[in-house]
Image (spheres, rainbow, N blue to C red):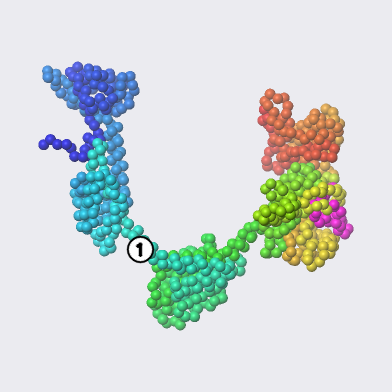
């Protein structure tokens, strides 16, 4: 019987083309399918030799041999590359089946069937992917035919309903669903097959074989089409949503707990007192949630320890801070059922431990709640004998366990379940956050203190010609951050800047202002300005930091306020004025030169430095006081003092000498007396001064910086004057070479000679007046060249064709550092070289010079 093939036939996906060869081996028939697949119209194919027309040149010999064999009566099947037109490269691969035949005259001919291999490979890939998706889907996957009977089911479907997957082929929905649900499924399948509109998340209820509970599935249906567009069936995707339905029911129970959580949120956290917060937690939980409860907190955390010993394994000491009961006033016994543990009541305020193998210690150790069953016997007098179950819930705040809450229900009450555990964890967490706030405050306070300490120099700063000791003491434990600072800054020429300052105000804001001002001081010091210039620039910076966004000072704002500005503007002005007060500071800045043993001081409203010469009483240096930083309007003065060897210099803040219990003059006198007897090692002298002074008044921070002067030995300094003439360059090299040889620094001779030559040459070419050369030996080697010209050297990058301009580049390459500074009669250009350490090799001057080209 003639009929159309069923939907989904393989011929919908792969088309077979055909052509025939005549007795002469040329094409005498060309099908329309061949024309479509190979892209060659019949008028171009008929009468042509297929080998010449379609086979690449390198394969034509083989092609002709095969055609001859076919015309001799042999069948042949093989893969043949082909072109899609005359003169084109091969772009296809065909599988050809050639069958010998005869024409009407009885002569040999051939019929050829052609299949595109790429289409076959695509079908194979699609089938493999379809098999993988179908077989590995975690949901039930079924295919219904157009007769609404199953064509195929996956293993997941077969696992749920039992039996092998092949068992369900040809079945209808009535074979695995209850009747009513099967009718709904059949109607939905018919509608999808007829209309093509998918059905999503249709709910079906049924029983799986071997189970007593009803299951609920969510089914989605969509129509399948063949390559020709004809419907070939319906696909069904089913997911088990029984758990989701159960969760919806449980959500109703969870809503009943919201009232309890709302009450907890409203009541817990109104106090930072530990005992009050613990009692509030129990007032919320008893009797609404449990019959009795208790709260234990780590004793170490209550005492201020960050992590008490034993905290990680739950064996640390705990203190019972609260207990509540709806059935008895007796205290709650420890967790029962632990081998070797003799449970007994723990009174409020008592300190105790949980054994390592107890459930409570396990809850503390793992930070997970544990349900502890009660004892069955009533052989003990303690209340634990009537407890049905207990929830041991660790109090976790920000990943830190701070204690343990025990919720207990007595016999006759419903035992704790998963929802109860979640609620208990939430209640405990809310209380734990409040209890942890005090700990966090202490931690953040300590971090602020660490920040301030990081802004101070290290405990053992080093300087050429100076022994230095320093101390910093906070005012009180409640205000451990403040605005006092000190600093030791190395300057070119082995000079050292000593700085002590005090920002007005206390707390974190003053510490932040101190950090900004200290950074500014270090930046200005590295510019190698004079002390008075440093304080003048720092004063401008302090006024800028204390001003508002448009740079107006507090004085200008006050004038505007008095002239009738609005209330909102006045409030903003008041807030900015408070900020400007933070950037009011006092500071003393000193620069010590170990070669001349002279120290230059400049003061901005700070207490005068103290100096103790060997065998003499301490005296306060007469340094012009100046105005505090941030006030402005007055220039700063500076004085120069020669410090003899062995002298002791002390810089300090007012917290050391000023107190409400005695006048300032009395504190200064006591400070001088303490310094006069500080003839011991410098560190001990620092401690002696602090012990002699009243440092426990708790009113202000204390900063103390003490330096003992030694100066550079004469044999560590080489100083020469050179005439402003060309032969001075060679003379400078000779002097440098001889001096380094005397110092035993032969490894640095070549580099030093080259760099000295560059600096002296620049002084002759760009400067005027007498030239001075100085070499300084301390922890490093410093070379300085002075001339009378004020123009500062500027480093530039020379072009490849330039004959000069590379001198300062070379200085930068070979030296550890270089720079220039102004002097009263001109400028000084310097460079610094590290001393040989026997390990790292010095830079080769020749290589450095060549690298510039």
Examine the structure image and report whether residue 599 is included in the region drawn in magenta.
yes
- Picture quarter containing residue 349? bottom right
**Residue at horizontal 23%, vertical 22%?**
66
Could you tell me which residue is drawn at 72 percent across and 62 percent down? 475
Q: Residues within 10 Å of mark 1 (few under 14, many from 20)?
A: few
- Point out residue 356 in the picture as x, y percentages from the top left corner: 49, 69
Segment colored magenta: 597-624
690 with respect to 23 (left or right): right
Left or right, 440 with reference to 458: left
Q: Which residue corresponds to the image point at 26% horizontal and 27% vertical from the top-left?
A: 36
- The quarter of the image holding the C terminus is top right
Image height of 476 relative to 745, above or below: below
The residue under label 1 is 249
Q: Position of residue 678 (x, y in %)?
A: 82, 60
Horizontal and vertical percent position of residue 704: 77, 57
Question: Residue 755 placed where, x, y %?
Answer: 75, 34
């Amino acid at each position: 019987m003639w009929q159309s093939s069923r939907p989904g036939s393989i011929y919908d996906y792969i088309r077979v083309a055909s052509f025939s060869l005549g007795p002469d081996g040329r094409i005498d028939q060309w099908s329309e399918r061949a024309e479509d697949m190979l892209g060659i119209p019949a008028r171009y194919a008929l009468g042509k030799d297929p080998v010449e027309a379609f086979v690449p040149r390198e394969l034509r010999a083989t092609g002709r041999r095969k055609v001859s064999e076919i015309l001799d009566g042999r069948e042949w099947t093989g893969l043949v590359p082909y072109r899609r037109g005359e003169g084109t490269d091969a772009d296809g691969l065909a599988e050809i089946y050639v069958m010998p035949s005869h024409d009407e005259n009885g002569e040999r001919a051939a019929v050829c069937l052609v299949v595109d291999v790429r289409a076959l490979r695509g079908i194979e890939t699609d089938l493999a992917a379809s098999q993988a998706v179908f077989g590995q889907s975690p949901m039930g996957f079924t295919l219904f035919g157009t007769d609404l009977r199953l064509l195929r089911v996956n293993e997941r479907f077969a696992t749920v309903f039992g039996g092998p997957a092949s068992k369900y082929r040809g079945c209808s929905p009535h074979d695995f669903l209850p009747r009513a649900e099967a009718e709904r499924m059949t109607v939905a399948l018919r509608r999808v097959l007829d209309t093509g509109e998918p059905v999503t998340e249709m709910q079906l209820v049924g029983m799986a074989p071997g189970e007593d509970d009803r299951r609920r599935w969510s089914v989605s249906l969509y129509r399948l089409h063949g390559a020709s567009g004809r419907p070939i069936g319906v696909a069904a995707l089913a997911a088990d949503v029984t758990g989701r339905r159960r969760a919806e029911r449980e959500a109703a129970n969870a809503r009943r707990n919201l009232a309890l959580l709302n009450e907890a949120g409203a009541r817990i956290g109104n106090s930072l007192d530990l005992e009050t917060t613990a009692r509030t937690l129990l007032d919320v939980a008893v009797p609404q949630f449990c019959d009795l409860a208790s709260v234990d907190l780590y004793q170490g955390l209550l005492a201020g320890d960050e992590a008490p010993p034993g905290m990680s394994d739950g064996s640390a000491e705990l203190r019972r801070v609260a207990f509540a009961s709806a059935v008895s006033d007796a205290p709650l016994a420890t967790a029962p059922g632990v081998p070797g543990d003799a449970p007994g009541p723990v009174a409020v305020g008592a300190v105790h431990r949980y054994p390592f193998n107890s459930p409570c210690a396990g809850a503390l150790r793992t930070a997970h709640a544990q349900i502890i069953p009660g004892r069955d016997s009533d052989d003990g007098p303690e209340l634990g004998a009537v407890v049905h179950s207990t929830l041991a819930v660790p109090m976790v705040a920000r990943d830190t366990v701070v204690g343990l809450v025990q919720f207990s229900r007595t016999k006759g009450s419903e035992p704790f379940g998963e929802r109860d555990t979640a609620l208990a964890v939430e209640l405990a967490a809310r209380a734990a956050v409040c209890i942890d706030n005090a700990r966090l405050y202490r931690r953040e306070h300590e971090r602020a203190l660490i920040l301030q300490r990081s802004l101070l120099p290290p405990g053992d700063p080093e300087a050429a010609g100076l022994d230095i000791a320093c101390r910093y003491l906070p005012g009180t434990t409640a205000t451990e951050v403040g605005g006092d600072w000190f600093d030791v800054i190395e300057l070119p020429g082995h000079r050292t800047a000593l700085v002590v300052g005090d920002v007005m105000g206390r707390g974190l804001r003053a510490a932040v202002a101190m950090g900004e001002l200290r950074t500014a001081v270090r930046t200005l010091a590295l510019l190698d300005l004079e002390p008075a210039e440093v304080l003048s620039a720092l004063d401008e910076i302090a006024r800028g930091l204390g001003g508002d966004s448009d740079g107006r000072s507090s004085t200008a704002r006050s004038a505007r306020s008095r002239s009738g500005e609005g209330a909102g503007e006045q409030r903003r002005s008041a807030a900015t004025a408070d900020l400007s007060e933070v950037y009011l500071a006092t500071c003393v800045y000193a620069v010590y030169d170990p070669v001349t043993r002279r120290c230059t001081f400049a003061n901005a409203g700070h207490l005068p430095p103290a100096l103790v010469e060997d065998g003499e009483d301490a005296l306060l240096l007469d340094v012009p006081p100046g105005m505090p930083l941030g006030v402005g309007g007055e220039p700063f003065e500076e004085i120069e003092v020669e410090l003899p060897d062995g002298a002791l210099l002390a810089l300090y803040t007012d917290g050391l000498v000023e107190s409400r219990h005695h006048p300032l003059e009395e504190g200064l006198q006591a400070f001088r007396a303490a310094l006069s007897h500080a003839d011991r090692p410098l560190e001990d002298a620092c401690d002696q001064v602090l012990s002699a002074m009243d440092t426990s008044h708790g009113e202000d921070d204390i900063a103390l910086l003490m330096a003992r002067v030694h100066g550079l030995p004469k044999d560590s300094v080489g100083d020469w004057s050179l005439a402003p003439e060309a032969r001075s360059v060679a003379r400078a090299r000779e002097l440098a070479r001889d001096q380094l040889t005397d110092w035993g620094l032969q490894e640095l001779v070549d580099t030093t000679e080259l760099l000295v030559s560059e600096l002296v040459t620049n002084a002759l070419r760009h400067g005027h007046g007498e030239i001075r050369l100085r070499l300084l030996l301390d922890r490093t080697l410093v070379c300085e060249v002075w001339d009378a010209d004020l123009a500062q050297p500027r480093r530039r990058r020379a072009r490849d064709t330039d004959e000069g301009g590379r001198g300062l580049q070379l200085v930068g390459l070979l030296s550890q550092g270089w720079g220039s500074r102004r002097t009263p009669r001109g400028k000084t250009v310097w460079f610094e070289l590290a001393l040989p350490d026997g390990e790292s090799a010095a830079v080769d001057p020749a290589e450095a010079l060549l690298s510039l080209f």
